[in-house]
Amino acid sequence: MESESRIEAVLEQIVTKATAAPCPVHLAEAIRYAVFPGGGRVRPGLCLAVAKACGDREPALADAAAVAVELLHCASLVQDDLPCFDDAPLRRGQPSLHMRFGEAIAILVGDALIVMAFGAVSAHVHEGEQAAACAQILRTLAEAAGAPAGIAAGQAWESEPSVDVVAYHHAKTAALFEAAAVAGAIAGGGKPEGWRQAGVSLGAAYQIADDLADALGESGTLGKPIHQDGNKARPSVVASLGVDGAIKQLDQWLGQAKQSIPECSGRGNVEEFLNSAAARLCPPALRQKDFTTESTENAEGAE
Amino acid sequence: MESESRIEAVLEQIVTKATAAPCPVHLAEAIRYAVFPGGGRVRPGLCLAVAKACGDREPALADAAAVAVELLHCASLVQDDLPCFDDAPLRRGQPSLHMRFGEAIAILVGDALIVMAFGAVSAHVHEGEQAAACAQILRTLAEAAGAPAGIAAGQAWESEPSVDVVAYHHAKTAALFEAAAVAGAIAGGGKPEGWRQAGVSLGAAYQIADDLADALGESGTLGKPIHQDGNKARPSVVASLGVDGAIKQLDQWLGQAKQSIPECSGRGNVEEFLNSAAARLCPPALRQKDFTTESTENAEGAE
């Protein structure tokens, strides 16, 4: 698909620039390892789908925003796997980054990816109308990535003795989906507010899919150790509602994401994107299974 | 001094915003702990001194740039102290951040501070001429913080089996001083290229001061464990040139910083700033001492 090749091409450009001389060799290898091969690239896919639906007014800015969102996501995955977080030896079936390159390099890759995200969008700030769009996107990314309500805050909730579950799930997962939709709308020339809820709803569905994958996935198939949430007693929709209840809620969020799409000429394309994201999130086999007894069925939604 | 109060006031605003509800309590406390009380605030001081010398055309943008530089510096200190880097229990005489709040929170504080730095400057991107200045500052910050040649790269050199000493020292210390000077010039309405070398030279002097402090400092006075460079066999100017040779080179860099100041009405003020930075870097007592035998004299330059 055209969007997928746009995303990979711009990621390649940015990674090539960040890993050029005089970058230390191990850091350069590790940055590339964190970004390629990717998972579903669903966040940048959402960003570009929304940008196109809005008219794709600034395609290069939309690409930069999409790639920035993916880089922030990659940074969060590297950190999530660290010993002081999930202590995960595998990611997508491969050694997690710190297992391959060590903890110090993993932490620095996280920094570098965050900086690359802001650098990618900043490269498009010029005078005039585009500057205002860039600024809005940069502020959207900062909100989604940092404190008080972005990814850093989401991960920090896991260190709190008592957790605000709504704030935790929004910050850890939905905030970046929200940013992807909002940034896509801004770059595409649309009204960002109309798209915000579609991003939040898809993000909420992904959070549930992640809980399902954690509760049910087979480590060998899913490519990461399961039961992290259970082991660390993190809030999980599966733990509170059961598997069937979680699937029901996941479907509600997906439905809400579709209903939230503003009226526009590209509405059908965004619906199509959401349908394909939904198929990845909760494969048909999972819906047909009886989860009143424990199961090892695999949900492939999470990365 | 006016600059100092400007820096503290803007830091307070940005920290207050980042730690507001719904920020998790420990993350909020830890972000504040990382930023206050500060060290010498020499990097933001340089940024504002240069901005003033250039005419201080956009004081709010200069403040944002100065504070962004300081936030990136604070992030690097939190990371430097982590067990997989220097494993330092103390920073400025207090428990280092991970000793107080744990490793996970320390890593997330690093992320949040980096995001806050870019967010602070992005908040000033508006249409027109200021947008171009903002964009230049954002790109300057990204270069100084990330890969291939910013702080992340500088710290990553410590994981390499063989080190490019020039690239290492520039990336780890001088790059952020360079960014401070360049960003100050841009915000102040001056020509950034003319100020670049002054920043690089002051940064190189600080790197030597840090090596001196590491070799000579008393842990109790300096507030951090000494001999980190020696323990980890990092390149050190003191190890290669001896203490007297290092002081001589430090003075050369300070002299070069002063010579590099472009002709402008505010030249005297920047010289005054560099003189006070120099006094902090290498106190007179250190210059008068005989270092042909081992000494525990304290150099207070490093943070």
Image (cartoon, coloured by chain):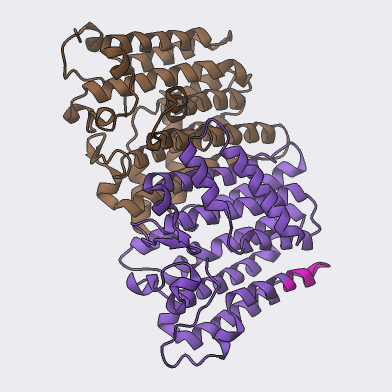
Chain colours: A brown, B purple
Which residue occupies the foreground of this view, A227 or B163? A227
Residue B290 point in image, percent of width and height: 50, 93
In the image, is residue B223 above or below residue A38?
A: below
Magenta stretch bounds: B264-272
Residue A85 point in image, percent of width and height: 33, 40
Is residue B268 a member of the stretch shown in magenta?
yes
Q: Residue at x 67, y 39 (%)?
A: B123
Is residue B228 a member of the stretch shown in magenta?
no
Image position of A195 (left or right of A16) = right
- Answer yes or no: is residue B238 visible: yes
Residue A285 point in image, percent of width and height: 22, 11
Q: Main secondary structure of the magenta part?
A: helix
**Among the 4 quarters of the image, the one containing residue A275:** top left
**Farthest residue, direction right:** B265
**Among the 4 quarters of the image, the one containing residue B185:** bottom right
- Answer yes or no: is residue A22 visible: no
Which residue occupies the foreground of this view, A254 or A190? A254
In the image, is residue A237 above or below residue B40?
A: above
In the image, is residue B285 above or below residue B136?
A: below
The total of numbered circles placed on residues is 0
Q: Residue at x 55, y 47 (%)?
A: B32
Q: Residue at x 39, y 17 (%)?
A: A205
Image position of B216 (left or right of B248) = left
Residue A218 point in image, percent of width and height: 18, 25
Image position of A296 (left or right of B142) = left
